[in-house]
């Protein structure tokens, strides 16, 4: 498939997987409009998902049936908050569980359908891990060849689960096999092996028993052809056809995650910005180490949105960062630009001159408060300037009213 990126400011959304969760990770979002997704997801899953995001301790969150749905939901909240700004990706990728989030981000699956599917996946994997207990460990500072040799020496029951980056590979297997591997690693010149606190040997044959339940759930899920490609964990290639995803997601369950290879594909696209959408920041770190020439940032809390807007505004031309795609959309059609500080407001003279119907782009200046520019976090058509020349405004006060253009 043709690699994207020629002549455009390519923005990529990447989504974290299991292991990025943390206690009270939803607290920062409770006052944000995107928090409304928690109630919707709770109704779909018939569970109190707000509890997982606000009150669950690390032990409860580490259970796979809880980890996956809570991490997915945090990514959806962050995705919704970004889409409310009018910013959309040109390509998506997700690490393991994050691939399901990426499919929603690309419009290949609806939010409600993904909630049901992720809940089923988490439950199936939880039961499989209880049936065949396993463990995972990160091998640091070693080549793929060295890790393969170490796995061979550890004997039966250990596999490579994630190719994360050069010098970071995750292995998984039975508890006994992982213990053997850890005991042997220095014999292969490998300095560090760190056990990962997860509840199973994921992306290995140890969870084969989860496949029938997941296959049934995938068969009941409607996928859509997407304008935005998603890079698959299974083959590190772009996919946009609905018919491909049931098989790819089923195979992904017990196959290694080719994340390093996925990043290499993205490098060929020369992205200007990589945005990790959801909790943690693990993927951002991998991109910064592997692709230092690319701006990588994480949106895991509302405060991160301002930095995202700054980066979008700095790169330009702005219209290329605010494209729309077909599929599930979260944001409303009407938006308000609000003051981010208090002071005397002056509208931008060009907008005053153009008046109603002026096209506003993400990051465009709509006026100033004192010496500080006020920039729109949204794209759309100007309906009216709410604040007028010389008006003293307060933080959070509406300044301009926009309406998004038709998709």
Image (cartoon, rainbow, N blue to C red):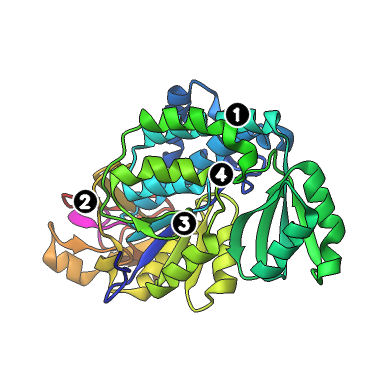
| Sequence-first tag of 3 and 1 | 3
Q: Residue at x 86, y 67 (%)?
A: 187
Instruction: Answer left or right for 26 relative to 79.
Output: right
- Give 71 or 300, whichever is nearer the viewer: 71
Mark pair 3, 2: CA separation: 25 Å
User: Left or right of 9: which side holds 304?
Assistant: right
Q: Which circle's residue, 4 or 1, is located before the other in the chain?
A: 1
| Residue at numbered disc 2 | 404
Q: Is residue 381 magenta?
A: yes
Q: Is residue 128 above or below residue 243?
A: above
Do labels 3 and 1 touch, CB within 8 Å? Answer: no
Could you tell me if residue 345 is visible in this image?
yes
Can you say which quadrant of the picture contains the N terminus?
Answer: bottom left
Which stretch is magenta? 378-388
Label ID, residue 243:
none
Where is residue 379? Give x, y as percent: 26, 58
Is 58 on the left-hand or right-hand side of 333? right
Label whose residue precedes the other's in the sequence (4 or 3): 3
Tell me the residue that label 4 is attached to: 254
Q: Residue at x 71, y 70 (%)?
A: 142
Q: Residue at x 46, y 40 (%)?
A: 250
**Residue 14 is covered by the magenta coloring:** no
Q: In front here: 74 or 376?
A: 74
Q: Which residue is mark 3?
A: 14
Mark 2 and 4 residues: CB-CB less than 8 Å, in contact? no
Q: Nearer the viewer, residue 262 or 83?
A: 262
Q: Marks 1 and 2, Cα distance to the nearest angstrom?
A: 34 Å
């Amino acid at each position: 498939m043709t690699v994207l990126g020629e002549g455009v400011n390519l923005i990529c959304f990447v989504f974290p997987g299991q292991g990025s969760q943390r206690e009270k990770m939803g607290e920062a979002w409770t006052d944000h409009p995107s928090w409304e997704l928690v109630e919707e997801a709770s109704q779909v899953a018939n569970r109190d998902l707000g509890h997982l995001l606000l009150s669950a301790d690390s032990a409860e969150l580490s259970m796979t049936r809880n980890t996956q749905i809570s991490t997915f939901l945090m990514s959806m909240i962050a995705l919704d908050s970004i889409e409310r700004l009018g910013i959309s990706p040109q390509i998506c990728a997700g690490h393991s569980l994050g691939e399901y989030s990426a499919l929603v981000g690309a419009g290949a699956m609806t939010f409600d359908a993904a909630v049901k599917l992720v809940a089923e996946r988490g439950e199936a994997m939880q039961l499989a891990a209880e049936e065949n207990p396993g463990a995972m460990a990160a091998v640091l500072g070693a080549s793929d060849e060295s890790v393969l040799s170490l796995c061979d020496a550890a004997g039966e029951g250990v596999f490579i689960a994630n190719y994360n980056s050069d010098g970071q590979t995750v292995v998984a297997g039975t508890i006994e096999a992982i213990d053997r591997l850890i005991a042997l690693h220095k014999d292969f010149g490998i300095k560090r092996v760190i056990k990962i606190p997860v509840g199973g040997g994921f992306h290995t044959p140890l969870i084969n028993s989860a496949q029938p339940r997941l296959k049934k759930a995938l068969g009941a899920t409607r996928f859509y052809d997407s304008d935005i490609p998603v890079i698959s964990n299974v083959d590190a290639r772009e996919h946009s056809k609905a018919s491909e995803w049931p098989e790819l997601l089923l195979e992904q369950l017990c196959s290694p995650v080719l994340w390093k290879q996925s990043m290499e594909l993205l490098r060929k696209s020369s992205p200007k910005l990589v945005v990790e959408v959801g909790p943690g920041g693990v993927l951002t770190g991998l991109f910064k180490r592997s692709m230092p020439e690319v701006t990588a940032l994480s949106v895991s809390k509302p405060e991160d949105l301002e930095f995202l807007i700054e980066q979008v505004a700095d790169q330009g031309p702005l219209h290329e960062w605010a494209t729309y795609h077909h599929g599930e959309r979260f944001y409303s059609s009407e938006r308000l630009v609000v003051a981010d500080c208090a002071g005397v407001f002056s509208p931008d003279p060009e907008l005053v001159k153009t008046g109603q119907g002026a096209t506003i782009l993400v990051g465009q200046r709509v006026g100033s408060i004192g010496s500080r520019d006020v920039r729109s976090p949204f794209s759309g058509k100007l309906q009216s300037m709410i604040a007028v020349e010389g008006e003293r405004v307060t933080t959070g006060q509406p300044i301009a009213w926009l309406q998004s253009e038709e998709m």
